[in-house]
Amino acid sequence: MPLMTLTVILYIAAVAFLGYRGFKHTRSATDYMLGGRKIHPYVMAMSYGATFISTSAIVGFGGAAGVFGLGLLWLTFLNIFVGIFIAFVFFGGRTRRLGLRLDAHTFPELLGRRFQSRFIQGAVSALVFVFMPLYASAVLIGAGKYLAQQLGVPYEVALFTFSVIIALYVIMGGLKGVMYTDALQGTLMLLGMVILLVMTYVRMGGIITAHEALTQLADQVPARLAAGGHQGWTSMPAFGSPLWWTLVSTIVMGVGIGVLAQPQLAVRYMTVKHQKELDRAVPIGGFFILMMTGVAFVVGALCNVYFFQEEGQVALVAAGGDVERIIPMYLQGAMPAWFSVLFMLTLLSAAMSTLSSQFHTMGTSLGRDFYEEALGRKGHSEGGILATRAGVLIGIMIAVYLGYELERLFGRTGLAIVARGTALFFGLCAASFLPMYIGGLWTRRITRAGAITGMLVGAVASLLWMLFVKHEEATAFLLCERLFGVRTLGIKMVDGVEVFRSTGKIIWAYVDPMLIALPLSALTTWLVSLCTPRLSEDHVNRCLGTASPAKNQTTRNQGESS
Amino acid sequence: MMGMADPWITAVYLLCIAATVLCIGWGIVHWNREE
């Protein structure tokens, strides 16, 4: 325990030093919100990756791989190919250039200025500020419980101390403080996961031997999982089964595509000075994500081999049915004591890097986008930073309050609700923002009305599907049961027995909201754009840099009058 | 193949490595790309 405490103190001191450096180098709103647009590619890539990967991605999704098996690697593939390659190569450069041309400092401001609409900026920032605290409190609860367990302190003390440390360097250091500390935290995460992968494969006799041992456990699949379509940990679930839909639509597609429209990630593209910095960040980000989710999923699945050899049970049974205990129990039993200290830092870093970016994004949404821009109170704060700092503080207070209350009121059930809140945020961002974000970067034809209606249709469809159809969410939120007397509208009663509604292989209650809301939102954006007036040619030229500028004064006047 | 029961799992295991190699290759080829 003294080694653990000393390590934590050294780690906190390093974080405080980097946060102080961020504070010393922050002099303007651009510094505070975009790191001065001069961030090093290594820092940018590690910050992007560390923000994306939270404790729940390692412990929660790693544990899920202990249940679902290696099929979760499809999410790793999408995380690398879509979340890094497509994001940096295709979205990154265009977002950076558009942000520069429009002098945008945040994701809502980028979309608002692209469509010359204060409503869009206000609505995007409101969606972020309302739903991101749920996502942040999920990460906060996970980190608070883990710290309390590791350091032997009460949960409330761990949560408060943890939040104050993050609050200090986010409020004072701005995005520079966040990204400098992210780079340190990302490096620690990388070190921990590389060692975990090597030690796991070595312990199990090598790569092929470990996989073969896992394959041979196929007849040990618990009956309940087998009934849901589970065919073993080195096989995909049966096509069209409930497990297949959960794996493919929610875990793989929902998170894999949803990453493109995450405001706290999209803003990272605007923090570098040149295109070549984005290109240099691609290999760093790709390797980082492979080592994070790839290792978590492979080790999570291989936990079954360890527990079967040691206890004669598969991982889920050994963990007493609690998915989130699989990885910690494996580390405690299979790894040396020194590694548990390093891995504690890995998980602490994962939580802090994700939370700091969430707090910063909530702060800029409330202070910059909503208070200063949407409400038109610009100029009321010194250097444009004060309102954002106040926004960060309010965002942290809400997330901490939720962290205390959800844990106190609901206990384990509360955790289910906040985990659902995370899924809700990813799906909502993709369905609401992705069509107008893609349209704003690539097409001249998308109109302001198209962007607004697409965003509203995406948000409403996503929320309705989640509250009334999607099995786990509708059951957790209880609204459907109170209004219609059934847990979800995806279920019908036949002779007093619940039967899932299906069309062919599609089981509607297991289809992720994003697969319904995103096509609806994209279609609405396209159709409305076809029959509403375009933005002025000069403004679009300025945004996309596709033609020589002319009569820009007129464009500016038009934009302001709208 | 590679100790997996399902060729789709073998495929995705290799795809993850291939996607990472693609990212590394892109970074090397475009290390000094001009805007």
Image (cartoon, coloured by chain):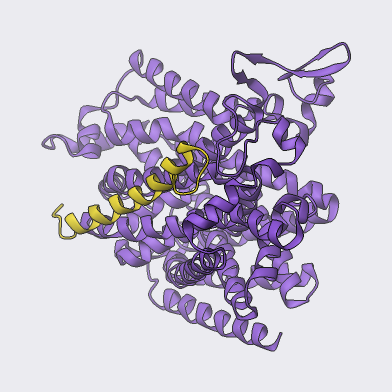
Residue A234, given in percent of the width and then of the height, sits at: 55, 43
Q: Residue at x 59, y 13 (%)?
A: A504
Residue A198 in the image: x percent, y percent? Answer: 49, 67
Question: Which is more toward the observer, A384 or A544?
Answer: A544
* Extreme-left residue of the structure: A548
**Can residue A2 be seen at all in this image of the molecule?**
yes
User: Quarter of the image holding residue A488?
Assistant: top right
Left or right of A281 on screen, residue A335: right
**Tally of numbered tags:** 0
Q: Is residue A116 visible?
A: no
Residue drawn at point x = 72 percent, y = 67 percent: A159
Of A367 and A434, the residue lying toward us? A434
Image quadrant for the N terminus of chain A?
bottom right
Tint of chain A: purple
Find chain B in the image and tell me its colour. yellow
Which residue shows up at 59% across the image and 26% down it?
A: A460
Quadrant of the image containing the C terminus of chain A: top left
**Considering depth in this image, is A425 or B20 the residue closer to the camera?**
B20
